[in-house]
Image: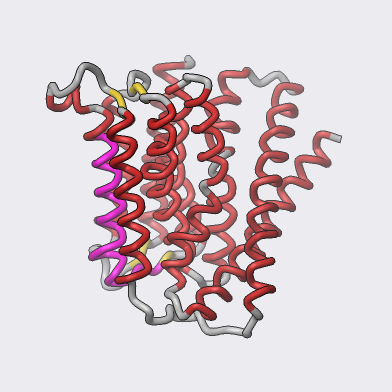
Amino acid sequence: MTLFLLLVGLGLLVLGADWLVDGASAIARRAGENEFVIGLTIVGFGTSCPELMVSLTGAIQGNADIAIGNVVGSNIFNVLFILGVTSLIFPITMTKENREKDIPIALGVTVLLVVCGMSQSLFGIGGSDSLSRIEGIFLLFVFAAYLLFCFKFSSKELNPGQKGKAISLSIAVLLVTGGLAGLIFGGNMFVRNATELARDIGVSDKFIACTLLAGGTSLPELTTSIVAAAKHKDQLALGNILGSNIFNVLLVLGCSSIITPLAFTGITPVDAAVLILSSSLLLMWSFTGKKCHIDRWEGAAMLLLFAGYYHYLFKNNYL
């Protein structure tokens, strides 16, 4: 029964991602918006819902490690693993606007998180490394400004392959809603039953926590990005990851730190360095090669870095 529910959860993830990509693309066409902007906002927010719920729950319960660790871990997983796997299968094309504006903004938000959260260690400012309520309000202010910037100044030019069969707005909204529901419920079902199956075969809880549960909240981003890339909607795939990471920092941690100040005691300099390096690699890849894209070898390099980082986690915390 566990294996059956595991497969059902996987099926919901794939079906939900398929519906979400088609619905989001249709909304982009109807609204005259670039697919990247839709991926950055609607899809990015939708796939960040699991992180939002986990971090808010951790903040309400006074567990800062869950709130902070969930976002830092998810953002590293999103870039190094998800974009690594996706580009290894389907190289992801990036635009000049991605290189000059979108990726630098994502990198800037990442640096902002590290500077605010680790100000004592970096600059000797504040009593301890933490996100205060004032900093949480500031992150939400930046988030509001970011959304305004996205819709007001982003290119309205359609992406290659964005034109397609017309779908009514009501059907598109239903596809997006149903797709998000499938991703969230399917992801929860998959993680829950995968955890139970792993315990049945004798895998330790610590190993489960570092693998299945750590990547569990990023399953919506993973399936959505792979399906989007398979449908040659590269901008939707890239926008999904960048949007999710920005939402995680500005909205998720902004709201969580207002509920309770979030201590960064569980975040090491290595974690912070890998977090910044992951976004820096995207910017570097946008300047390599004749075309602006994430090539297969670049995806493989990100996966190797991800594997090295997880080896460090296991070696220093669980072995």
In this figure, which colouring scheme has been used for the structure? secondary structure
Residue at horizontal 58 percent and vertical 31 percent from the top: 213
- For residue 108, side relative to residue 319 (left or right): left
Q: Name the residue at 40% across, 40% down.
A: 76
Is 145 on the left or on the right of 184, as rendered?
left
Please report the bounds of the magenta region as a residue range.
93-114
- Residue 168 is covered by the magenta coloring: no
Of residues 198 and 108, which is closer to you in this image?
A: 108
Q: Which residue extends farthest left?
A: 123
Eyeballing the image, is 152 above or below 66? below
Please identify the dominant SS of the magenta region. helix
- Is 101 part of what is drawn in magenta? yes
Q: Quadrant of the N terminus?
A: top right
Using residue 203 as the reference point, say whether residue 49 is left or right of it.
Answer: left
Total of numbered circles in the picture? 0
Q: Is residue 291 above or below residue 209?
A: below
Q: Horizontal placement of 141 versus 19: left or right? A: left
Q: Position of residue 245 (x, y in %)?
A: 41, 47
Q: Give the x, y percent position of residue 100.
A: 23, 65
Nearest the eye: 182 or 3: 182
In which quarter of the view is residue 268 placed? top left
Image coordinates of residue 247 in percent, x first then y, are 42, 48
Measured as percent of width and height from the top left, residue 44 is found at: 48, 55
> At 28% across and 35% down in the image, what residue appears?
135
Snapshot quadrant of residue 105: bottom left
As displayed, is residue 27 above or below residue 280? below
